[in-house]
Amino acid sequence: MLEAYLKDALVARLTAWADDEVVLAQRLSEWVGHAPILEEDIAIANLAQDELGHAKVWLELRQELDGSDPDRLVYFRDPLEFQNATLVELPKGDWAFTMVRQYLFDAYENLWLKEAARSTYAPLAEAASRILKEERFHLKHSSLWVERLGQGTEESHHRAQEALETLFPYVRQLFQPLPGDEALVEAGVVPDLKALEAPYLEEVTAHLVRSGLRPPEGGYVPKSRQEHTEYLWSLLAEMQSVARWDPEAKAW
């Protein structure tokens, strides 16, 4: 059982995790039919589907806590109500941009999911363990692409480095706690993200350097998950358009 005083905090944390997955899935889906090779077209469609499935898991855990409807949360909230990190809402860019972002996000997820699998809240621990099995494959896929791009042609290296220059500063936002996280960490419900930042940076930097890439220093870090770019508005307008066109429809 979860203590009543922790419920609101866990609802907020589950929503943030789910929003990351929903928005990233939408960005990945923009590549379907446009990936550089057929094999990757299939792979990225599977990645998008997995991320959306993970969002469903987190939103269903939220539903158990507050009775909210996962579909309405995804399709009928306005952009300012979303709690996703800025990293995932940036436009898909070229293939190097997409793969570098995916690697940075996959490495983050793998790290905190390992810790969340030991949560004192059994439903969260079970969900994290299930999702981690898929995320390990995601990380292997994206890390190999970063290596290929970084050590490939002069063009691929340039594009990967350029993507890294843009994306890397946003990574630090992933480790910023939400207002209720401290109580959840003390209760062993969620991992301490701030404590995971240093191991993450060490692991990711080592792989990037092996791949011939240089992580940049400095750059703007969004202050909270309430801070969004204009890109989220257009993404959600497209994603939510069918549901909002006929809110009472039972099937689309």
Image (cartoon, rainbow, N blue to C red):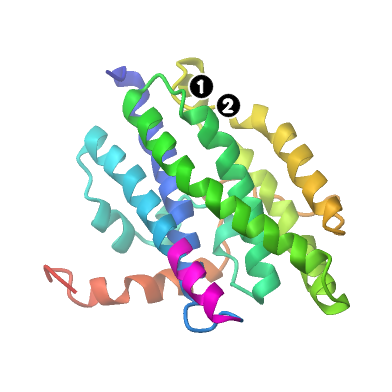
Quarter containing the N terminus: top left
| Image position, residue 207 (x, y; %) | 78, 49
Amino acid type at mark 1: Val
Q: Which residue is mark 2?
A: 192
| Secondary structure predominantly adopted by residues drawn in magenta | helix
- Residue 85 in sight here: no
Residue 165 against residue 218 in the figure, above or below: below
Q: Residue at x 46, y 23 (%)?
A: 118
Dot 2 and dot 1 residues touching (CB under 8 Å): yes
What residue do we see at 65% from left, 31% from top?
196
In this view, 1 is above or below 200: above
Say which quarter of the image contains residue 25.
bottom left
User: Does the magenta-highlighted stretch encompass residue 41?
Assistant: yes
Whether residue 53 is visible to the viewer of this picture, yes or no, is: yes
Residue drawn at point x = 17 percent, y = 69 percent: 247
Q: Secondary structure at mark 1?
A: helix
Which secondary structure, mark 2?
Answer: loop
- Decide which of 92, 158 is in the foreground and name it: 158
- Tell whether 106 sits left or right of 126: right
Could you tell me residue 29's position as x and y percent?
46, 72
Q: Which mark is residue 185?
A: 1
Q: Is residue 33 left or right of residue 223?
A: left
Distance (Cα) linking label 2 and label 1: 6 Å
Q: Nearer the viewer, residue 175 or 211?
A: 211
Does the magenta-highlighted stretch encompass residue 110? no
Residue depicted at x 22% and y 78%: 245
For the record, the magenta segment spans: 37-47
Q: Amino acid at mark 2?
A: Asp
